[in-house]
Amino acid sequence: MPEKDLAEIIQMPRLFLDSLGVGIAVVDAEGGRLRFANAEYCRIVGYTLEQLITDRIDFFEFTHPDDRERNRLQHERLLAGEIDQYQLDKRYVRQDGSVVWAHVIVNPIRDGEGRLRWYCAVVEDITATKILEGQLAAAEKLAGLTTFNIVVETDGRSSGSPASSVPSLRDMMRRVHPDDRDALEKVIRRAIVKRAGYTQEYRTIDDSGGFRWVRGMGTCVDSSSEGRTHLVGSTIDITETRAGRDGDTPEPIRKILGHIERHWNQKISIEQLAAQYGISPRAVYQYFSAHGVSLGEKIKQNRMQHARRMLCNPDPGDTVTSIALKCGFNNSGHFAKEYRKMFGETPSETLRPLPRLQ
């Protein structure tokens, strides 16, 4: 075999490792001396291989100060044999002061006799992902949007995912207004039982003790790899929209919306509302027509939400017909049809009891 071809074959492992899209580094178990680093690893940490080897730079030196203790604790557990591997997201500070986010996986390497010889670190640059996550979080906060991912166990208990801001269904329910809690819980329970989705408007209690209206949306997703079910979804703050407080909403319209919210179970005509709040009926019709929904539809949606809460938390002796009448629906058949269109199930299904969430 020609010497040139032999040299290329010898170089192939190094060429292969340098062509990978992730960083690879091998460190002595004793002393922590770097033995090997591929090109991507050097790019991520911002040092040449010669600098890393000659200057014996410890990886903790270019780990961001805020991440060092967390990294050190994991590495000590690996050294002590408490864990077989660790992985974490952390930041590297390069020579030029720039910061790179990386996902790091560290595994021990043993020789043929089982003795620990080296540690191998696989490092993936996730800076772009972290930037996008930050931008998404900022956009969600601006829009009043929050997301959640709750693991639903087979026995009915639940726990939040590691990335979730909602640890469990029980914790989520604690922030729901007491008057809306039973209705929301029943909707979610039905979604879990049916492996389906839900949409529900309800009030949440803020840190000051006041409340905000939100529209909650969720669905159940089965994970075959985990053998578990996730309830994933989001809530968006609709307080201003529900109260008609958009910047271009005339004061009489805001008062009308507030009236139908407070007196949802009282019958009143649009003409009476217009006269009470100093606006012509025509102006009321024009405003809601321009916004894609009639005032009559707004009133119906509001009453439907109240009917749903009453069906989810009925009083003794309540029936679909009696609740429909309480909410201003005289035709129970029409009520059931509109209810199903709005909530994806019949009033009887909502009224039917389900096991409580754990």
Image (cartoon, rainbow, N blue to C red):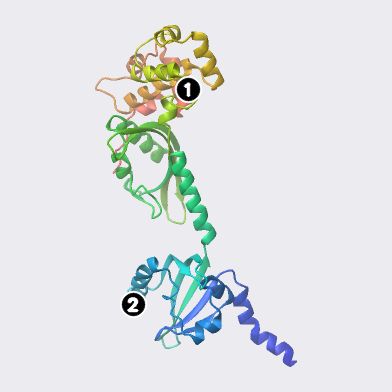
Q: Position of residue 239 (x, y in %)?
A: 40, 30
Q: Position of residue 325 (x, y in %)?
A: 35, 14
Residue at the (40%, 72%) spot, across then down = 85
Disc assigned to residue 249: 1
User: How far, Cα to Cα, is label 1 from label 2?
Assistant: 65 Å
Q: How many marks?
A: 2
Left or right of 218 in this view: 170: left
Residue at the (45%, 28%) spot, across then down = 241
Q: Secondary structure under badge 2?
A: loop
The tag earlier along the polypeptide, 1 or 2, is 2
Q: Could you classify mark 2 by the number of other residues whose Cα lies within 10 Å: few (under 14), some (14-19), or many (20 or more)?
A: few
Query: Does residue 337 appear in the picture of this structure?
Result: no
Q: Position of residue 57 (x, y in %)?
A: 46, 81
- Which amino acid, mark 1? Thr
Quarter of the rendering occupied by the N terminus: bottom right
From this view, report whether residue 310 is shown above or below residue 139. above
Work out which residue is located at the far left of the displayed protein and give it.
316
Q: Position of residue 351 (x, y in %)?
A: 34, 26
Q: Choose between 30 and 185: the one closer to the eye.
A: 30
Q: Choose between 228 and 22: the one closer to the eye.
A: 22
Left or right of 31 in this view: 131: right
Quarter of the rendering occupied by the C terminus: top left
Residue at the (29%, 20%) spot, across then down = 318
Q: Secondary structure under badge 1?
A: loop
Pair 1/2: label in front: 1
- Which amino acid, mark 2? Gly
From this view, report whether residue 319 is shown above or below residue 153. above
Work out which residue is located at the far front of the displayed protein and give it.
96
Residue bearing the label numbered 2: 81
Quadrant hosting residue 175: top left
From this view, report whether residue 310 is shown above or below residue 356. above
Q: Could you classify mark 1 by the number of other residues whose Cα lies within 10 Å: few (under 14), some (14-19), or many (20 or more)?
A: few
